[in-house]
Structure formats: structure tokens, C-alpha cells
Image (cartoon, rainbow, N blue to C red):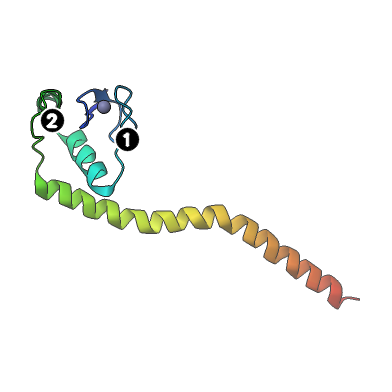
Amino acid sequence: MTWTPCLACGAAKGAALVACRSCGVQPGDVTDRARHLVAAELPEAAREALARAVVAGEEVALDPAEVSAMEAALADASGPRVAAFALAVLGAPVLAIVGGLALLAAGLLSL
Ligand SMILES: [Zn+2]
């Protein structure tokens, strides 16, 4: 079972983007999410060292290139995904309304 260090308190979390059970912090903005995702990809020993550094209050050393690459991936993914989600949520009622209007129009035309 893999784990990710919480970059706020150093506790182990089950997944990079969930709220920490120890301190309650959930990665919020793109940079924060990118840092947690990069941390999650590290080898076990590096994750342990990272967790120890957070607990000790030291500067958390993550590869800035990896973090910015992850930021870019997150920024790319969020736009289309949000649009797809909005379509999935809003599409059904809109189709129902359009379908209802079409039926109404057909009914009126047949009078
Ligand atoms: Zn935490």
C-alpha cells in the first residue's frame, strides 16, 4: 500500500489529494496539488525523508521542474474535465427540456 507524506504536517496519507487525517489540510491550489502529486511519485525512502523534513520544519526539497510539469498537467486537465462534468450534470435536464418543447411543438402542430 502506497502513501504520500502530508506536506503540511508530515503525516502519512493514503492518497496525494485527500485531506490529511492528522492535520486536516487538503491540497488546494494547483501548486499545492502538484507538490503533493510529485511527492507521491517519489521512492519510499525519499518520501520518508520528506516526511521527516516536514516534521522537523525544514525546507521541503522537491524538484521544481517536476512540480512545474505537474502544474502544467493539472492546468491542462482541469479545463476539459470541468467542461465534461458540467455537460454531464447539465446536459440531461437541458435535453429533457428541449425534448419536452419538441413534443409540445409537435402536439400544437397536430391540432
Ligand atoms: Zn497533515
Residue 99: image location, x then y, percent:
71, 64
Residue 36: image location, x then y, percent:
22, 37
- At horizontal 27% and vertical 48% (from top left) the residue drawn is 30
State the residue in front, 18 or 98: 18
- Count of marks placed on residues: 2
Please state if 3 lies on the left or on the right of 106 as rendered. Answer: left
Query: Mark 1 is on which residue type?
Result: Gln
- At horizontal 31% and vertical 27% (from top left) the residue drawn is 20
Residue 2 seen by the camera: no
Query: Mark 2 is on which residue type?
Result: Pro
- How would you rate the neighbour count of disc 2 (Cα within 10 Å): few for under 14, some for 14-19, many for 20 or more? few
Task: Indicate the secondary structure of the residue bearing disc 1.
Answer: loop
Please state if 48 lies on the left or on the right of 24 as rendered. Answer: left
Residue at image mark 2 = 43
Whole-angstrom CA distance, mark 1 to mark 2, is 22 Å
Q: Nearer the viewer, mark 1 or mark 2?
A: 1
Residue at image mark 1 = 26
Residue 102: image location, x then y, percent:
74, 69
